[in-house]
Every structure is written in C-alpha cells, then in structure tokens.
Amino acid sequence: GAGVSQSPSNKVTEKGKDVELRCDPISGHTALYWYRQSLGQGLEFLIYFQGNSAPDKSGLPSDRFSAERTGGSVSTLTIQRTQQEDSAVYLCASSLMLAGPYEQYFGPGTRLTVT
Amino acid sequence: KQEVTQIPAALSVPEGENLVLNCSFTDSAIYNLQWFRQDPGKGLTSLLLIQSSQREQTSGRLNASLDKSSGRSTLYIAASQPGDSATYLCAVKSTGTASKLTFGTGTRLQVTL
C-alpha cells in the first residue's frame, strides 16, 4: 500500500500569512505524529494523535500552531501569522498504534520557507 | 527526559573503509531504536529498527547493535561507498503515553573516492 504522504512538498509564504500542511497517514494507522526539523537543528517532536484526539499539545512551539485530525485519517497542521523562525521541514509519521513497539513511518516532509 | 547523543558529528572516510557510528541515550525505558538516513534536502529513510528485546539487526552492509542497559547503539557500515554519504540519525521510541521518537543530532558521513 501507499506510504505516508504530505502536501505541499514545498511552501513559500510571506511573514504574517497563515499556512496549512497536510498529512495522509498509512491506511489503518491509528497514531499520527508531527515533527519539525529546523535548519541546523535536530528533529523535534510537536504533537501526536491517537485517533482524532491530541491529548498533549505542549510540544507545539507557540499558540500560533494548531493541529487537527479528522476521521482518524488526514491531519492538518496550521501555522497562523507565520514568522521567519517557522521556516523548517515539517515531517509527519504514522504507526499502527500509539503505545508499543510499532514502527513510525515517515512522509517526505513539507519544506516551509517564510520570507 | 530522554536525551540522544550521536558521535561523531561528522566523519570523512575513503571508499572501502568499514566504519562505526555511535548513538547513546539516557533513559533505557524504550520500545525500540531506529537508524535513519537523510540525504540533503530530503526526508528520512529508515535503515534498521531494533526492538528493545533484540541485540542487533542486519541489512546488507549495515549492522546495528543495541545495548539497552548501557544506553548505547552502534551502526556498522561495511565497505563504505560514495553513495553512503548522507546524515545518519538514530532515534529512540520511549515507553509512555506519547511513545514519541527522540532523535539524535546526527552524524554527517562523507565517503570519498
């Protein structure tokens, strides 16, 4: 079957604009994760979903960031009033279940550039 | 809080050499450890996943070992090739509610002709 897909692959936006990043997980995967990789930085965890629920939003960098998941499938990460420090590659991953030794499968990422 | 460290940060070797990349983690409460490869401007390619109950995994010229009690993993690359040039990341999946991956900062490998 298909792997994790993300869209767009690249996004250039002006400072202050809102952006939406989309993730399509592997079919049947109940857990979904968002990570961010900033230039010169490591990969940092942002948020996870179990089904449509995101119990812990503390990894989101600021209140300009929000995420939702509908139908236990597609997830959208929204960044409002983008800032230059938001420029990064945003990676999505899914796994069969949240807890347990299940592998996380990563999408190709969305490269966000804020000008 | 889980912390993952990778040594060295960068490595340059001539083609044909065998090499070892190191990864250490501070909390042994993990489900598994995964090694990834990342090419410049690209996403993550999973190389090997070792479950906490396992000692090693092999795929082609790659061999990864795990010593959970000491918080260490190594990635051994045999007979390196220029096409192996990339950044190698290790990540541990911690037990707990989120079961998120915690990544090291990577080893940037350059294999020269």
Image (cartoon, coloured by chain):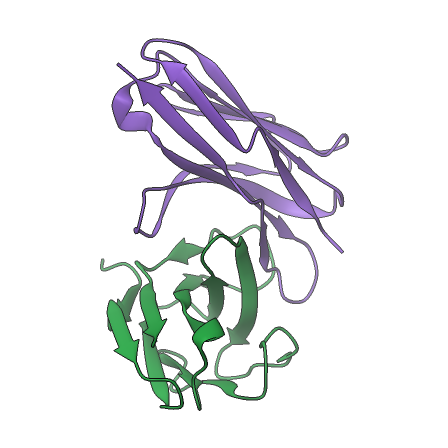
Chain colours: A green, B purple
Q: Nearer the viewer, residue A22 or B107?
A: B107
- The picture quadrant where one finds residue A107 is bottom left
| Residue A26 can be seen in this image | no
Position in image of residue B89 (x %, y %): 49, 41
The picture places residue A48, in percent across and down from the top left corner, at 54, 72
Residue under the point 34% across and 78% down? A21
Which residue does the image show at 39% across and 9% down from the upper left? B17
Relative vertical location of residue B13 with respect to residue A99 in this rendering, above or below = above
| Residue B48 makes an appearance in the image | yes
Measured as percent of width and height from the top left, residue A64 is found at 52, 88
Choose between B110 and B69: the one closer to the eye.
Answer: B110
Report the number of numbered marks: 0
- Report the quarter where the C terminus of chain B lies: top left
Whether residue A27 is situated above or below residue B7 in the rendered picture = below
Choose between B78 and B58: the one closer to the eye.
B78
**Which percent across, then down, holds residue B34?**
51, 41
Q: Residue at x 41, y 16 (%)?
A: B13
Question: In which image quadrant can residue A99 be found?
Answer: bottom right
Which quarter of the image is occupied by the N terminus of chain B? bottom right
Vertical arrangement, residue B46 with respect to residue B60, above or below: below
What residue is shown at x 65% (from left), y 44% (from top)? B4
Q: Please, which residue is most extreme toward the front here?
A: A115
| In this view, A58 is above or below A110 | below
